Amino acid sequence: MTVSSSTSKVLTIDTINPHVRTMEYAVRGALPIRAEQLVRELRNKDNKLPFDKITFCNIGNPQQLGQKPLTFIRQVTALVEYTDLLKDENMELTKKMFPEDAIDRAKNILGWTNNAIGAYTESLGIHEIRESVAKFIEERDGFAADADSIGLTAGASVAVERILNLIISSSNVGIMIPIPQYPLYTATIAKLDAHAVPYYLRENKQWGLNAEELKQVLSEHKAKGIDVRALVVINPGNPTGSLLTKENMVDIVRFCEENKLVLIADEVYQANIYQPERRPFHSFKKIVRELDSSVELFSLHSISKGMIGECGRRGGYYETVNLDKDVSDQLYKMAAVSLCPNVTGQVAVEIMVNPPKKGEPSYNLYQQELNDIYESMRRRSIKLCDAFNALENITCNSAEGAMYLFPQIRFPKKAIQAAEELGKSPEFLYCMGLLESTGVCVVPGGGFHQEPGTFHFRSTFLPPEDQLDQFIERIKGFHDSFMDKYRD
Ligand SMILES: Cc1ncc(COP(=O)(O)O)c(C=O)c1O
């Protein structure tokens, strides 16, 4: 196919939406792009690369690194997808292959969709599944939830985008976001041409929040004429792996209430809690209700995280609290414009919030699989954190939750100079060097934003447990030679 010169194109880099151009998304940025190229090079058996595989630690995508899907989710999904398995003439075989509760669940779900899993559902998702979500929230928090305040989405990303679209009414709007943050927020705010208003998490306080700083940041931005309308919290944190204290959460709700800010609580890692006695998870919904607060809250959850890790299946939900009815109607309309969330994602949400119950045939296996993944993630988080802390010039907070570690590196001056000469940040130099020499793909801290003058990278702790020692050895080998090369 011939390609005409770019001047004859309607769409060029200069004519597309400029806000798309300014958007950055580091977890799928330069490092992962190079990693994908290396994957292709590795397929060539004459390659001269010094490693035999790429380990993708740039994104919390557990099944990419071999995490086994939960059997029950796949059984129910298989049955709702291939309904011939449920025909009378096939039931004998099906009963040999599938436990009774998976068959019952599949039949129920099919009943909710009029036996048509390939049909559009209600715009907010299947009503019965939203009822299951409401029940899950009630049991989690001890406060009532309403299916009509819940919207199912194709992952939490869709919910974030929809909510920010709703809130950002002009380019003068500011959204308070934690720094470091998950780049979905800066990217979406940039795309909508609004202002990201950063508040910093304190690395030396286990990435805790300073409530006084919130006030200061808000008044500084208000003084500049920015219409700050919402505050985002990621709890447990990405990339920090930290959990907010209950005191911090109360401060945040009070702060939002006093300053008329909408609260967006990204709680996709609520099941990844590794020090539950010391730092348990509390939902913002529960805190809002306990305080009897009128704050307008959006809270998000996802099937991509927890022990489920069904990232590619795309499922999640948001719950709204204290939202004006007219605004809910507009949010409904936004969902309606994209018709409905994908149905297999909805099915996985149903099972996440309504897993097999005690006494049902799949209960033990489900719990066993969940627990094995949980315990392994917890052990891996500790082992990798200890390994980072044992490296020269690296300090790393432990993970209280989520799937990530965000170690800080203090670079020798020579490394900083070498990076400057290349027009790159030192952590980019480090992460690219790590990738090129070991096949380990992590993300430079700048992609998440960070306190000026500090340097970090983010790594998941998702490599399989039986490969973790080798993984750590690869990082250590590179790290030591990097530090030797640039030693002052
Ligand atoms: C904090 C946070 N929010 C949202 C998402 C998006 O999740 P989903 O796969 O449900 O779109 C991620 C994904 O890594 C995340 O870390």
Image (spheres, rainbow, N blue to C red):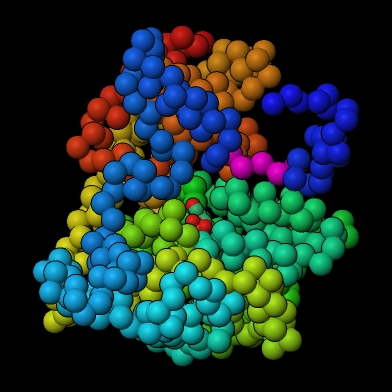
Front residue (pair 81, 18): 81
Q: Main secondary structure of the magenta part?
A: loop
What residue is at 44 percent from the left and 24 percent from the top?
A: 40
Q: Provide the residue span drawn in magenta.
A: 22-26
Where in the figure is residue 83, as x and y percent of width and height?
32, 72
Where in the figure is residue 262, as x and y percent of width and height?
68, 73
Where in the figure is residue 106, as x and y percent of width and height?
30, 76
What residue is at 44 percent from the left and 15 percent from the top?
A: 482
Residue 131 appears left or right of 82: right
Q: Can residue 393 be seen in the rendering of this structure?
A: no
Q: Is residue 135 magenta?
A: no
Residue 398 appears left or right of 413: left
Front residue (pair 75, 192): 75
Residue 138 appears left or right of 329: left
Front residue (pair 115, 277): 115
Quadrant of the rendering where the N terminus is positioned: top right
> In this rendering, is residue 435 above or below 186?
above
Front residue (pair 332, 485): 332
Where in the figure is residue 211, as x and y percent of width and height?
61, 63
Residue 326 appears left or right of 445: right
Label total for image: 0
What residue is at 88 percent from the left and 28 percent from the top?
A: 7
> In this rendering, is residue 201 above or below 328?
above
